[in-house]
Image: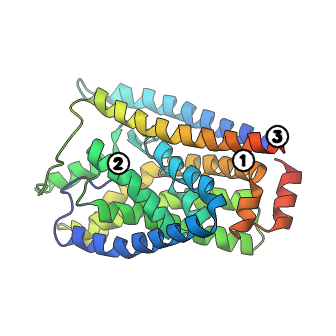
Amino acid sequence: MHIMEGFLPSPWWEIWILISLPFVAIGLYQLNKLVRERRETLPLLAVAGAFVFVLSSLKIPSFNGSCSHPTGTGLGGILFGPCIAAVLGLIVLVFQAIFLAHGGITTLGANVFSMGIAGPAVAYLVYKAGTRAGANTYATVFIAAALADLVTYVVTAVQLALAFPGTVGFLGAFTAFAAIFAVTQVPLAIIEGAIIMLVFKYIVQLKPEILTRLNLLSESTVQKLREAAV
Amino acid sequence: MKYGMEIAVAALIVIFAAVFLFQDAAIQATLGDGEEAWGGADGEAAGLIEASGYEPWIEPFWEPPSGEIESLLFALQAAIGAVIIGYIFGYWRGNRKAA
């Protein structure tokens, strides 16, 4: 989903930076508050960030002859919401832009929006809707994380199609970019969902009190999940 | 503790790997000399844009000088993350055992 350096013409790169900026600002504010008021959630925050580091460095072959990488931001989105996930995504994207020439400084706004904001926002909303409806927690996490991954790539295709409608127009360009990004991503999204579901299980087993304190799970659900011990 | 979910995820990854090997065999058979399959989707999109005549208006100020150095930095990125995850899960587990 990385849009390479220089591959967004003006005014698109400025527009995406302006759109991403408020999310990152709110995220920094929320982070500050979290650090001050709920220090016990810090290790969980570190795990969510570390997850983005690991998953976004793995370029995995998909079924159609090209490679792409999972994003890992779905976990941060579920646990802390899209604004804090935007900050986590930003850290990784800066690392990759500076050291790996992967993505770029001018395209940072667009990349943060797709990987750090749009994907995690979907994960956050799916998780909230799923738990409110009383769906199976692990299944909800799986779907939330897989969709976050997929949506990230669909958003990248939208961003590129907006900037490069060419002669075929937005829809034609979107189809072409989505064929590259979204199709490749489907199997990887399933894998990412499965791995994040597994990590969520370990958090439930090892540190459920953080999840109840963040209002992600009720005491009774935690009790039930721990007894079922799948 | 049961391991149902671990087994399911492991099975998923094995299926994924098997499909990859199968697919790879099919793709390799159709490749000509000097062609390489399994390139990055990011690069493919960039190629599609450049094919329309667009020139990137700014270059990255630094690029890893070789594929080896690039994979070094990617491995470093994964290692940093893995160390943090392992440390914290280990810490939590130790805490629970001690309690």
Label 2: which secondary element: helix
As measured in the structure, the alpha-carbon distance from the residue carrying label 3 to the one carrying label 1 is 15 Å
> Numbered disc 3: what chain?
B
Assess whether mark 1 and mark 3 are in contact (beta carbons under 8 angstroms): no
> Numbered disc 2: what chain?
A
Most extreme residue toward the front, as rendered? A36
| Residue at which label 2 appears | A95
Q: By what rule are the colours in the image chosen? A: rainbow
> Can you tell which quarter of the image residue A158 is in?
bottom left
Q: Is residue B83 above or below residue A82?
A: above
Label 3: which secondary element: helix
Q: Is residue B28 above or below residue A109?
A: above
x and y percentages locating residue A166 in the rendered image: 18, 66
| Residue at which label 3 appears | B97
Residue A133 appearing in the image: yes
Label 1: which secondary element: helix
Q: Is residue A106 left or right of residue A183?
A: left
x and y percentages locating residue A120 in the rendered image: 51, 64
Category of crowding for the residue at label 2, using alpha-carbon neighbours closer than 10 angstroms: few (below 14), some (14–19), many (at least 20): some
x and y percentages locating residue A14 in the rendered image: 23, 71
